Amino acid sequence: MRPVRTSVVTAAAAVAALTAVTGCADKSDAKSGGAGDAIQVTATDSSCKLSKTDFPAGHVKFDIENKGSKVTEVYLLFPDDRIVAERENIGPGLKQQLTAEVKAGSYEVACKPGMKGDGIRQKVNVTGGAAVKRNPQLDTAVAEYRKYAQEQADETLPKVKVFTDAVRAGDVEAAKKAFAPSRLGWERTEPVAESFGDIDPKTDTREDGLEKGQKWTGWHRLEKSLWADNKIGQDEKDLATELDKDLADWQKRVGTAEITPTSMANGAKELLDEVATGKITGEEDRYSHTDLSDFKGNVEGAQKAYELLKPVASKNDPALATELDKQFAALNTLLDKYRTDKNSYDFTAYDKVGEGDRKQLSDTVNALAEPLSKLAAAVTK
């Protein structure tokens, strides 16, 4: 979940987003039916201009520049507002790149100055190009990642029920104990969950991320009741049942997610950015201080996507694979220092982690995020 929930919305649903802190130096792949030259996206506080709105299907690269005065986000969206690809937290004067595997059809590009509201939209038409010539190993990676995402959803529901049953029973301490474990599967596969748009705002929004008129529901609403208010009333019991329902919907829809090698690679980077903008700051689980458990889930999900893509990435860019192996190992070793039990996901409460240690965690995350931003380019060579 991003630090301030801002979504591209339709009348039917809010589209949740994935956080991007640094640019992704991906390359388009003209040989695989790509658009050739990158599409220039110029965002200002009042406009969203594209160098072209018609381009062929394949690996498409967007070069994004924010010429406005506000932090912005840029999305490529399906007609039903599901996210194809996105890049967020683009500061004034900054440039970023984004690569996506795009099929023929109608889409919209949305720029969101200030990261609020519906965004400024441009319709784009992707014409039928040559099919992307994909390495069979990448097809295997996608299939295995889809299986992994489904397994995480399937395993999450029973853990959530332990949490929600405790809430419905009015047992504050049992609910607190079950809160962090109930979130691990979600945190590992958050890019897939968020791609549906309407589920994440119901389940994983913080109070400061609510859109105007949005009802606050989900994990963090219950977290506040348990830790800040130390109470469970009928409202909380109803919210627990609503959380069960919303996550069951997520479980059923995981198998329909649009997953490509580039979305896996970009998703891995986005999971690290989730850590950098939410967990490191302590904003994510601000009442329970269980941020390090979520942190570990994000890292594990990113590493799973990387490991599945590694056979191709290591062949195309062996130096990158070596660096990623090194940085994942360093981050996992550092996180393990905060486990209270090496055989569980119990971690030191984050409010007990000092500023110096937080900086070390932040530096180690950034050391991994930079090479991870190059993974999508490595698998599309």
Image (cartoon, helix red, strand yellow):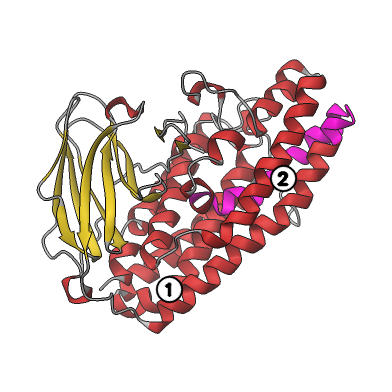
Residue type at mark 2: give it: Ser
Residue 209 image offset from top left, x and y in percent: 49, 26
> Image quadrant for the C terminus?
bottom left
Q: Is residue 67 visible?
A: yes
Q: Is residue 232 visible?
A: no
Label 1 residue SS: helix
Q: Is residue 151 left or right of residue 46?
A: right
> Residue at (65%, 55%) from the top-left corner?
153
Q: Which mark is residue 310?
A: 1
**Percent from the top left, x then y, of residue 265?**
39, 61
Q: CA distance from mark 1 to mark 2?
A: 29 Å
SS for dot 2: helix
Question: Which comes before the other along the chain, label 1 or label 2?
Answer: 2
Where residue 75 appears, x then y in whole percent? 31, 44
Q: Magenta region: which residues?
A: 166-191
The quadrant in which residue 100 appears is: bottom left
As drawn, the residue found furthest toward the top would be: 229
Left or right? Give the position of 354 relative to 25: right
Front residue of this view, candidates 172 and 349: 172
The residue to which callout 2 is attached is 182
Q: Nearer the viewer, mark 1 or mark 2?
A: 2
Q: Relative to 295, is 323 on the left or the right? A: left
Q: Is residue 45 above or below residue 32?
A: above
Q: Residue at x 34, y 63 (%)?
A: 375
